[in-house]
Structures are given as C-alpha cells and as structure tokens.
Amino acid sequence: MAKLKTGRHTSAIKASRQAERRAQHNRGVRKVLKQVTKDLAEAVKSGDSAKTAQTYGKMSSAWDKAAKKGVVHWKTAARKKSRLAKLALSAKKS
C-alpha cells in the first residue's frame, strides 16, 4: 500500500492494519484452543490417565493465556476449563 503524503485518515489506515494483524493472531490462538480441547477429549476416550492429566494441564494453560490476552472472555475460559475438568475427572473414575 502506498503511503499517503498527507491526509486526515492515515491513522485509520494504520488502525486497519493493526486490526488485521491482531485478528490473524487471534485466529491462531483460537485454533490452538480447539486443538488442545480435542486432544483432551481423545485422551479421555483412550482411558490413559497420565496422558489425560498432562493434556489437561496444557489445555488449562492455553485457555488461561487466551483469556489473559483478551482473545476470549475470562468467564468463557473458566466455564470451558470447569467443564473439561469434569470430563477429565470422570474418565479418571471409570
């Protein structure tokens, strides 16, 4: 994109670039969240309690980091973590 010599909306152009960059980053973070959540579900299904515990740690950390950065709301992250913790514990009992 060519730089404008003068103009009132140069800051809007920069804001648009920043928004695009942040949206790209947020999509990547959400992709990681989906993947670690699926990994936990697979670990629970396999019945391996050690793998489930390790995967739960990674999943919990990923949701916390996403909430910290504002990619997802902190209450959403807490709700997801709680439900997935129940899932992980139910697999441990079975």
Image (cartoon, rainbow, N blue to C red):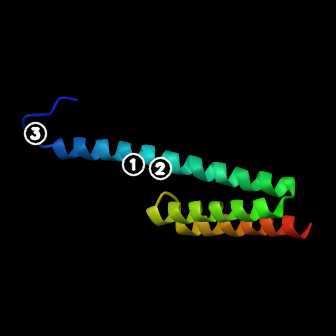
Q: CA distance from mark 2 to mark 1?
A: 6 Å
Residue found at x 79% / y 63%: 50
Q: Is residue 84 left or right of residue 65?
A: right
Amino acid type at mark 2 = Asn
Q: CA distance from mark 1 to mark 3?
A: 25 Å
Label 2 residue SS? helix
* Closest to the observer, 29 or 57: 57
* Numbered disc in front, either 1 or 3: 1
Give the residue pinned by disc 2. 26
Q: Position of residue 60 (x, y in %)?
A: 63, 65
Residue found at x 16% / y 42%: 10
Q: Quadrant of residue 88?
A: bottom right
Amino acid type at mark 1 = Arg
Q: Are marks 3 and 2 in contact (CB under 8 Å)?
A: no
Q: Is residue 2 left or right of residue 36?
A: left
Q: Is 66 above or below relative to 6?
A: below
Q: Are marks 2 and 1 in contact (CB under 8 Å)?
A: yes
Label 3 residue SS? loop
Amino acid type at mark 3 = Gly
Q: Position of residue 55 (x, y in %)?
A: 70, 59
Q: Which mark is residue 7?
A: 3
